Image: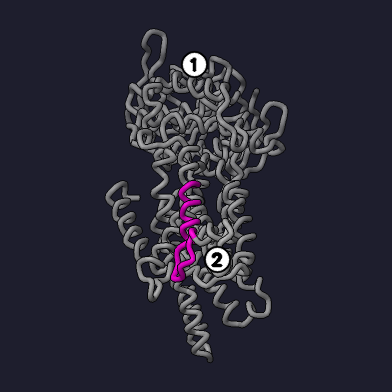
Amino acid sequence: MSARTRLHPPALAVALVALVALAFLLSLSIGPSAAGLGALFGQLTGGEADTAILIMREIRLPRALLALLIGAALGTSGAALQGFLRNPLAEPGVIGVSAFAALGAVIALYSGLSALVPIALPACAIGGALLAVLILQVLSGGASTLTLILAGVALSSLAGALTSLALNLSPNPFAVQEIVFWMLGSVTDRSMTHVFLAAPFILVGLALLLASARSLEALTLGEEAATTLGVDLARTRLLIVLGTALSVGAATAVSGVIGFIGLVVPHLLRPLVGHRPAALLPVSALGGALLLLAADIAVRLVTPGTELKLGVLTALVGAPFFLWLVVSSRSGRGA
Amino acid sequence: MRLEARAITVRAAGRAIVEEASLTLVPGEFVGLLGPNGAGKSTLLRALAGILPHEGEVLLGEEAARRLSSRQRARALAYLPQERLVEWDITVREVVALGRHPFQRRFAQLTPEDQAAIGAALEDVDAHHLATRPARVLSGGEKARVLLARALAVGAPLLLADEPMAGLDPFHQLHVMEILRARAHAGTGVLTVLHDMTLAARFLDRVVVMNCGHIVRSGPPAEVLDAALLEDVYAVTPLIGEHRGSRWLLPWSRTSRRPSQD
């Protein structure tokens, strides 16, 4: 089954790169204003299209760049966590990492720290994500799917409760509304400042995650066999923990919580790379970028008036998908 | 390359699971590690493989194992865990290819040398025809052979196997013993945990017997495996016979006392 559906890995990567490029261009050209690619080309050929350029550069470019980066971060961290925990249900959103990152970001926003020092926003979110991954590692050392999911539920609830507490105690209802909206998850109305704030952390995080690829491959045989194949488990764990915290933390800091990308993307791509955890990492980065760019285009097209939040859309599609995965893994092998 | 273990002690929760165990394994030798459940066989094997922290010294060739990098150690010593884990739906060939992990560079393709080792290992365990099948859907016997091929593909001068025959039917038990013996007699030092006395008596060059965390006997099976040992260590009375110059031992009844628990 896997052997038959498998594509030549470079062919899959090339196809995904092409699709990501296409989605990126579409993302630049779709929006409430008429500024489209045609106008852009008009400008290039000497026409009058200054406004179009301005809209694209100031409004749509940061939006597209963030969707690209955040999608890549979520897709890769999902694939890496699944490989490391050897569990197809592991995902930053499901296991509570995103919720803790959001809590960190809310603390930064709420305390006014991020207004004083902009870098505090990604830093606090990364700190939150790091805390969640570390707690999870302790709770689920060599754990079953059930333990992992339960730990994730507990972490998400805790982060949710603390976030609610912060909002509850807020003296300023407008700040509350702003934070609640932000938490729904979106890349709308972001500027290049947000891109510069998040991109370095996301890129470093992605590099760390990709560096774990070979070890994830050997972990297919379990921790003992992997150790005797020369895998340094402590180093691999460090790469995954830091890589996930940096990429998911920074992504959540600028976008709010966007769930299920890390669950859906690796699941769809896994058969196409012959189920190999190492090969899954780079294509999940591309797949995540593609899916989030596409979803962000969809929210603009489907409900142009009150734009659906990106995080709401991914949850609407992702949560039933997650449920279906749980059900099918139950009937499959008792996971 | 020879393996020498000096006074290995492994503790868990303050208790010594293995105490002051010393043994050597030389190239070309097929050695069995025997003993009742809880004697410390798997623990000793894991300590030798570098998975468990331990007191005492393990030498691989002339070098102390703890001074080798994890990669150097992985090239010197292959380990086959008892639990037959394959976590993703990768193919049999990809499982066996994981044995070449200690030799691969990051992002590098398999070299012709890797391919040769993988092909030879699949051939050795008679699993060439399974190469493109997903490893997780194999039968128990097939999976055991494929994971053995993974360990063989390392091509390490030392091979430690933890109960590779567990759960296999007689045909596959004999097959695995034949594969291990062939590998040993081709120059690899092979140490395997097993429970079957007759297989031990027929195939092994030497047996090492553990009880309650200690190595209690070591020597050729003909000298070590007898009724007295089985009664002492396993608390069973065996039937013993001979067939074409080989001895068979069949544990027949429990003796009145329980196996010694220190």
Q: Residue at x 35, y 67 (%)?
A: A302
Query: Could you tell me if residue B46 is visible in this image?
Result: yes
As drawn, the label of residue B182 is 1
The magenta stretch spans which residues?
A: A17-38
Q: How is this picture coloured?
A: one colour
Write the residue at 49% across / 84% down.
A176
Residue at 46% x, 43% y: name it: A15
Q: Please, what secondary structure does the residue beneath circle 2 have?
A: loop
| Helix, strand or loop status at disc 1 | helix
Residue A321 vertical placement versus B39 (above, below): below
Query: Which residue is identified by label 2?
Result: A49
Q: Position of residue B257 (x, y in %)?
A: 39, 38
Q: How far across and down, in percent of the image, does residue B111 sit?
A: 58, 25
Foreground pick, A153 / A250: A250
Examine the structure image and report whether residue A26 is included in the region drawn in magenta.
yes
Mark 2 and mark 1 residues within 8 Å of each other at the beta carbon: no
Q: Nearer the viewer, residue B105 or A116?
A: A116
Say which quadrant the N terminus of chain A sits in.
Answer: top left
Name the residue type under label 2: Ala
**Residue B152 position (above or below residue B73):** above
Q: Is residue A298 magenta?
A: no
Q: Nearer the viewer, mark 2 or mark 1?
A: 2
